[in-house]
Image (cartoon, helix red, strand yellow):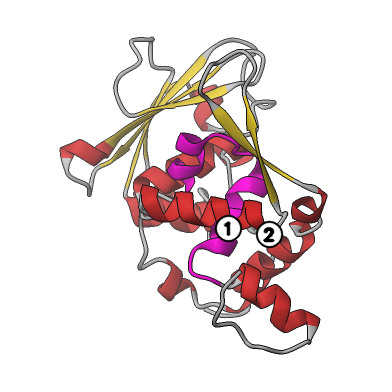
Amino acid sequence: MSQHGYKQFCPLAMAAEVLCTRWTMVLMRELIAGSTRFNDIRRGVPKMSPTLLSQRLKSLEESGIVERKPVPTERGIFEYHLTEAGRDLRDVVIAMGMWGQKWVESSLSLKNLDPSLLMWDMRRNLNPKPLPDRRIVVQFVYHDLPTTKRDWWLVIEPAGEVDLCWADPGFEIDLFVSTDLRTMTAIWMGVTDVSAEREKFEFSGSREISSTIQTWLGLSPFAVQKKLAN
């Protein structure tokens, strides 16, 4: 906890000393979303330095919000799990996200485009139920990006496990999806949908899969909140 806090007995002030340092609430979003290993957490906060991430995790551990546990089957590997106090913050994090979705202007949010973060979130929120019961590989091509960031692959296994690849996984591609990063981000945020942006997409491959893309795309968990700020 900061030694230069608000110095107030108010519970809100004391909670703010723990939670309102830079990156902490975004880090809580990742932990509540289910990330437990350092590298997986980093993929959800790609612009956060590893050193700062380590510091914030240690601070949350000292505050009783996170517990660092060794992985019994992997020597020297640790996971970060929310304690009861950490899990109790779930509604707080969701409420902040819903407020941001409702009141923060879309134009401001869409200035912060990041293909790695977008695809990571799409991976973990993807709904495999509308897809055929077999391995499905979807390649996303963001034609407005440089070649090093343009291509991404989602590999959806029959059991529902989804892998994100930034190099060709070597499987047959079921569907190619070509669009620009801003359009896909706006759809992920719930600002618009595939139908409304159809002219900005090019599909190649399975019509069965492309026709249901809006139902299986992994949207933001806050996309359900109606946006009042334009």
Q: What residue does disc 2 label?
A: 63
Residue 74 in picture, x, y percent from top left: 55, 16
- Could you say where residue 193 lies in the image, as x and y percent from the top left? 54, 53
**Residue 84, above or below 160:** below
User: Image point 37% across, 64% down: which residue?
Assistant: 112
Residue 180 visible somewhere in the drawing: yes
Marks 1 and 2: CB-CB under 8 Å?
yes
User: Which quarter of the figure has residue 191?
Assistant: bottom right
Crowd tier of the residue under label 1, counting other residues whose Cα lies within 10 Å: few below 14, some 14–19, many 20 or above: some
Find disc 1 in the rendering and name its residue: 59
The single residue placed furthest to the front in the displayed view is: 3
Q: For residue 95, which quarter of the picture?
A: bottom right
Q: In this view, does 16 lie above or below 137?
A: below
Q: Residue 202 carries which label?
A: none
Could you tell whether 111 is left or right of 16 in the image? left
Q: Is mark 1 on a helix, strand or loop?
A: helix
Range of magenta residues: 21-44
Task: Using a 10 Å C-alpha cutoff, classify the residue at mark 2 as few (fewer than 14 neighbours), some (14 to 19) or many (20 or more).
Answer: some
Q: Is residue 34 magenta?
A: yes
Q: Main secondary structure of the magenta part?
A: helix
Quadrant of residue 100 within the rendered picture: bottom right
Reply above or below: 9 against 58.
Answer: below
Which structural element holds mark 2? loop
* Residue closer to the observer: 162 or 173: 162
Q: Distance between the residues labelled 1 and 2?
A: 6 Å
Dot 2 amino acid type? Ser
Residue drawn 69% across and 26% down? 129
